[in-house]
Image (tube, grey):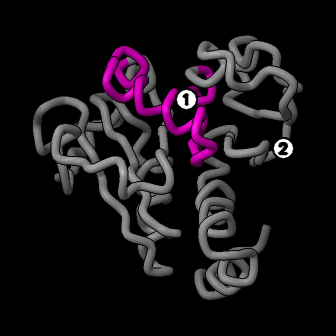
Amino acid sequence: MGRVCVFFAEGYEEIEALTVVDLVRRVGIDTDMVSVTGEKTVTGSHGISVEMDRLYAEVDFSEVDMLVLPGGMPGTVHLEAYAPLMEQVDDFYAKGKYVAAICAAPSILGHRGMLKGKKACSYPDKEKELEGAEVTKSSVEIADNLITSRGMGCAIDFGLAIVAVLKGQEEADALAEKIVYEA
């Protein structure tokens, strides 16, 4: 197991998206930065433009193990408005494949009814949109095939949780030590 797509829309939160890409690539997980804009370069909410690996239409989702939705505004709104991505989120959830979301993006999962009866976390202003969830203040929550996280300050915890799910806790712990991260 180990192919991840991180989705980028105009206004994404740079640290949340790029921390995940950096950490999962460090442990050898195939990772694609995917634009939902139709353009290869996408600009984040703080004016940082990044060249993507693929456009959405170029992804073969049968080869993907996890979808990652970074937060940021208006990035989260743009991700949720992109119907083809939402169809994939629904499909992955239904098949028990992993969907991970951080900051404002867990609200997307709440809007889709995926968090009912599950522990979840998000950016504090978005907690009310985690419909039916048991909202926590944890930096990361893993509930079945959903991973949620609170925001930029939790980006390393979020990335390490993704590594742990795909490569095991030992690999995540070794990576944390390598990057001199102490939770």
Task: Name the residue rendered at 31%, 24% in the picture.
Answer: 84
Q: How many numbered marks are there?
A: 2
The answer to which quarter of the image holds residue 122 is top right
Q: Amino acid at mark 2?
A: Ser
Give residue 134's position: percent from left, percent from top: 88, 26
Give residue 15's position: percent from left, percent from top: 46, 50
Task: Name the residue rendered at 38%, 51% in the picture.
Answer: 5
Does dot 1 land on a helix, a strand or a loop?
Answer: loop
Q: Is residue 83 magenta?
A: yes
- Left or right: 140, with 61 as reference point: right
Label 1 CA crowd tier, 10 Å (few <14, some 14–19, many 20+) = many
Task: Name the residue rendered at 59%, 39% in the picture.
Answer: 102
Residue denoted by label 1: 105
Residue denoted by label 2: 138
The answer to which quarter of the image holds residue 169 is bottom right
Question: Spatial distance from mark 2 to mark 1, Cα to Cα?
Answer: 16 Å
Q: Amino acid at mark 1?
A: Ala
Task: Name the residue rendered at 79%, 42% in the picture.
Answer: 143
Q: Against 176, is 91 above or below?
A: above
Answer whether labels 2 and 1 touch (C-beta < 8 Å).
no
Magenta-tinted stretch: 78-107
Observer-nearest residue: 99 or 44?
Answer: 99
Observer-nearest residue: 120 or 153?
Answer: 120
Find the residue positioned furthest to the left. Answer: 39
Q: Earlier in the sequence, mark 2 or mark 1?
A: 1
Observer-nearest residue: 49 or 2?
Answer: 2
